[in-house]
Image: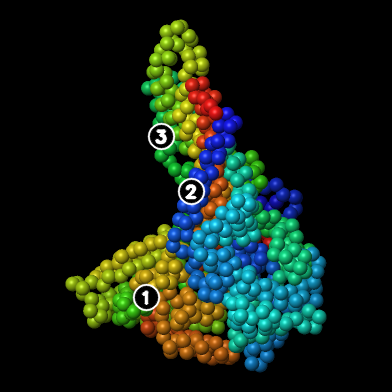
Amino acid sequence: MLSYSLKRLLQAIPTMLIVITIAFFLMRVAPGGPFDGERALPPEIEANLNAAYHLDEPLPQQYLRYLGNLLQGDFGPSFKYKDFTVTELILQGFPVSLEIGGLAILLALVIGLPLGIAAALRRNSAIDYAVMGTALAGIAVPNFVVAPLLALVFGVLLGWLPAGGWNGGALPNLVLPVLALSIQQIAYIARMMRASMIEVLGSHYIRTARAKGLSERLVVWRHAIRPALMPVVSYLGPAVAGIITGSVVIEQIFGIPGIGRYFVQGALNRDYTLVMGTVVFYGALIVLLNLVVDLIYSALDPQIRYDD
Amino acid sequence: MFTPRLAVGPLLLASTCLALPAGAETLDIGVTGELASFDTSQVSGGIWESQILMDVYEGLVKKGPDGEILPGMATSWEVSEDGLTYTFHLREDAAWSDGEPVTAEDFVFGWRHLLDPANASKYAYMLYPVVGAEAVNTGQQPPEALGVAARDDGRTFEVTLESPTPYFTQLLTHYTAYPAPKHAFDAHGKDYVDLDHIVTNGAFTPEAWVSQSHISVQRNPEYYDADAVALDGVTYHTIEDRNAGVSRFRAGELDIMREYSSSMYELLREQLPDATHMSTYLGSYYYVFNHREGHPTTDPQVREALSLATRREVISEQIMGGTFQPALSFVPDGIDHYRVQEMALEGDMDARMARARALLEDAGYGPDTPLHLRLRYNTTDEHKKIAVAMAAMWRPLGVEVEMINAEATVHYQTIAEGDFDIARAGWIADYNDAENFLTLLRSGVGNNYGAYADPEYDALLDRAAETLDLDERQQLLQQAEALAMDDHALIPMLYYVSRNLVNPALDGWEDNIEDDHPSRWVHFAE
């Protein structure tokens, strides 16, 4: 398994290179540069800026320079947040995003999985309809509606929790953003778990298990849940990567210093180095999490083996 | 922690406390963006940035609560008769937060640092009135060629200007004119603004910075007027979602929320009348006409017709809910030493529309040959609403408007290249002087998006730039604006207003036209 993992990681290198190359040139193709704004800069000042950030060099040279720096682990300085390097911004913001996103995923699993299982076991009952109805609402209502509502109700009207702010990650400041982030995930996971549970419960080996007289409890716990988890696990790979890299909406509404905003703002500001930094980071995370998913697969399903 | 409760409406009864030492009076301000750097040569120009920088640094002069210019690091200064040499006498007790004295050398160093091409400062041009500044900034001259000097053992700072610049003391309030600690730079190089060893000379000094969350500053005990500073510290919370900022203000987490969104104005005025501030501001919202060859807007009749059909009150009152003021002049009302020159739009709306129709007909446009305009605006709800309204106002004249929107970066690049007939633009003054606006119509200037060019206009501005007498200069500038308004060089539409939520329990906050509010004047009422 170790050598399999190593092989997968090595295979990821060309993928990452392609991602980096596409992102680098796409960003340069986008109209406007990092120093264009409401005010046109005097040409001599623009020349100073371009020289300071090597933007006056031919593009291929800039590309090679970027790759060279990247190999040394240097993402470069941010064009916008000048007192920080891109590495510093990501290192400062990622733990925050990871904490909020990790808690949200955990909450989503703890609530979503049992709800999905319960709904599948009592198919077409009141519980099923209630769970699926709520889940549908959870998916349909976007988090830019949920988040301000939560802040208004619990922060302003009731005053139980802070309406925003990070405050070093104090528990009261965590509750609303985690909740806002997890609602949609709970809904997705519950629906997915229900669907896959229903499919598994209708399969031949469950019928066989029931026929040999196993209790329903044992059938569900020992034979149904594990295979039913497979689609959820494969969903979780990219979903976790997406969530722990922050959500721009949640971060802006609750004032959380995560890295989600950099994906959007970096692109809007044409902060080339920041965009590249987030792309590389996100790409690496996806590669890593997909590998983890595959390893969990083999743990869940003995038929899947990654031989050397 | 002083947690103010606003006694306005049941919504505000609840409030959240943050853990802070008892008795500490800290001001929590919501600002709408992130500071680019504590190195003033690296600042990107946001309003929020000047708020933070003016709290931690102080230039030769400083601003009072009402925006008035007061002596700062300099206690007095003289101007030579030809208006070219300024001699500033620095205060004896001026010190950096590490106790080192602030000397003229720090100003010399700071200004050279700003103009050093290697530092690529975006706002370096603010100091271009100083002798040699432009040559230094473009690398044609060494930093030593800059017209600044430290004399009398560092107690006197002398500046020589290229030409008399009547608004020079206004420029000195800008962060580009702050000193930089030479001793700290000598010790740490470019990293001298790292929070571990940053030194500042303002009323406050930085303590913590969590990017995208907050910056905290504490009172600077070395500040010459530290005893008069009431607050123990200030925390600037980065708040990008303005509606979220309002929620946090209502929850009592913020004492001041800068630049709340205009769409919330009516609701806030109703629910928090004592806290909701709105005031005239040094900003102009206008539509640029393209004066380049081949565009219909080169015809003055077309320009006048479009301006005549623009109902500014409808935009300001009905569309923007009173959060802009209707404007008939390019220079906003309220600028020092200036009377705005409004364009003449006589008669009621029916008469104006009739005249607009006649003008367009004269220009050769009619039902069979409709005027087709490409209108560009940068993507925000506000600009979109206004653009849609403008198109609707022009439609009765038979004008067909094609609306094109793009994010700000693309928008400004496109209009600078001249690819439009009409485009939205806005300008917030860098300093309180009419010249800052009027120069945008000077031929060949970078921000003259429409490429307007009128030799007579340029000549008036040139003469104003050399005139020392303030009244005479005012007349010249006013003539220039009147000329541009008569020529319908652009469509002045709206004056900006400043919008702030301020806890009524705060004293020392005064609305002012520059919307500058140094925290050192603010304190909680007893």
Disc 3: host chain: A
Q: Which mark is residue A18?
A: 2
Can you say whether B402 is above or below B1 in the image?
below
Q: Amino acid at mark 1?
A: Asn
Helix, strand or loop at disc 2?
A: helix
Q: Position of residue A170 (x, y in %)?
A: 65, 42
Q: Amino acid at mark 3?
A: Leu
Residue at (64%, 43%) from the top-left corner? A169
Question: Colour scheme used in the picture?
Answer: rainbow
| Depicted B130 relative to depicted B278: above or below | below
Q: Is residue B446 left or right of residue B251?
A: left
Q: Between residue B105 and residue B143, name the one nearer to us.
A: B143
Nearer mark to the viewer, of 3 and 1: 1
The mark closer to the camera, 3 or 2, is: 2
Badges 3 and 1, same chain: no
Label 3 sits on residue: A136
Judge from the rendering whether residue B486 lies leftward or rightward of residue A170; answer left or right: left
Number of the label disc, if any, that sits on residue B290? 1
Q: Residue at x 61, y 86 (%)?
A: B162
Discs 2 and 1 lie in a common subunit: no
Residue sticking out furthest to the left? B368
Of labels 3 and 2, earlier in sequence is: 2
